[in-house]
Image (spheres, grey):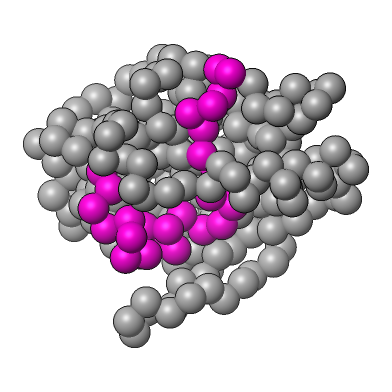
Amino acid sequence: MEKQELKHFGTKELRTFGRRHGKKLSNRKQWLMENLLPKITPKSDVYSTKPAILEIGFGNGEHLRDLAINNPDNIVIGAEPFANGVAALLSAITNESDNTLLNEYKNIRIYPDDVRILLHSPEFKSVKFSQIWVLHPDPWPKARHEKRRLLNHEFLNLLSAYLTQNGEIIIGTDHWEYYDWIIEQLKQTNLKIKSTTLDTIQTRYQLKNKAGTSNPKYLVLSND
């Protein structure tokens, strides 16, 4: 596990917990990281004309690709600090022969870092999302690691400020104790639970099901 100190925002220091790098990338994936990735990073000025969707921690990007295909008129932003996951997504959305972006994925933008840095940046203050997805975040099940959990009330309040009218935050986890913990955190926000059921594709992380539960649990939240 790597623990990296991030930027300071006012008096708050942000830290990202978890791996940043895995095994060495192939030559193709390394080329995509160096040459394609800078061209498809999020630019806040785009979203004044197109609606936007955000996925936080997209893993290898299976669900992000599904979002892009099913929402062609939206800009779909994925934030993921794990370099190998970013590289896997870049490989999946490009032609293997010439490394060009496939047409069905031209609405994808990738932020290869902690999403909180993006959301705290001044140029993103006016951006709004119709959907914010957080599927299978690390539950940090040990009591001493509870402070590392991403979906605390502070972060949920931050996300709620980026929702459009009628926008939704969609959360999924197979760790039921984490699910209950998130519900407790919601009591310190203005978010409301709209639904606890959801049809979504199975991702690699969902199939791993490290918690050993029968099914994931979901929360669909809104400000209304």
Is residue 57 among what the camera can see? Answer: no
The answer to whether residue 195 is above or below residue 49 is above
- Where residue 54 appears, as percent x and y from the top left, is 40, 39
Is residue 179 among what the camera can see? Answer: yes
The answer to whether residue 41 is above or below residue 71 is below
85 and 196: which one is in front? 85
Instruction: Specify the farthest residue to the left.
Output: 224
Which quadrant would residue 220 be assigned to in this image? top left
Magenta residues, start to end: 103-128
- Name the residue located 33 percent from the left edge and 56 percent from the top edge: 124
- Where residue 64 appears, as percent x and y from the top left, is 52, 29
Which quadrant would residue 100 be assigned to in this image? top right
Number of numbered callouts drawn: 0
Is residue 115 located in the magenta-colored stretch of the structure?
Answer: yes
- Name the residue located 62 percent from the left edge and 72 percent from the top edge: 4
Instruction: Specify the farthest residue to the bottom.
Output: 11
- Where residue 42 appears, as percent x and y from the top left, is 47, 47
Could you tell whether 69 is left or right of 99 in the image? left
- Where residue 117 appears, as percent x and y from the top left, is 44, 63
Which quadrant would residue 222 be assigned to in this image? top left
- Name the residue located 19 percent from the left edge and 38 percent from the top edge: 164
194 and 47: which one is in front? 47
Quadrant that contains the C terminus: top left
The answer to whether residue 160 is above or below residue 18 is above
Could you tell whether 109 is left or right of 129 in the image? right
Is residue 141 located in the magenta-colored stretch of the structure?
Answer: no
7 and 210: which one is in front? 7
- Name the residue located 71 percent from the left edge and 63 percent from the top edge: 1
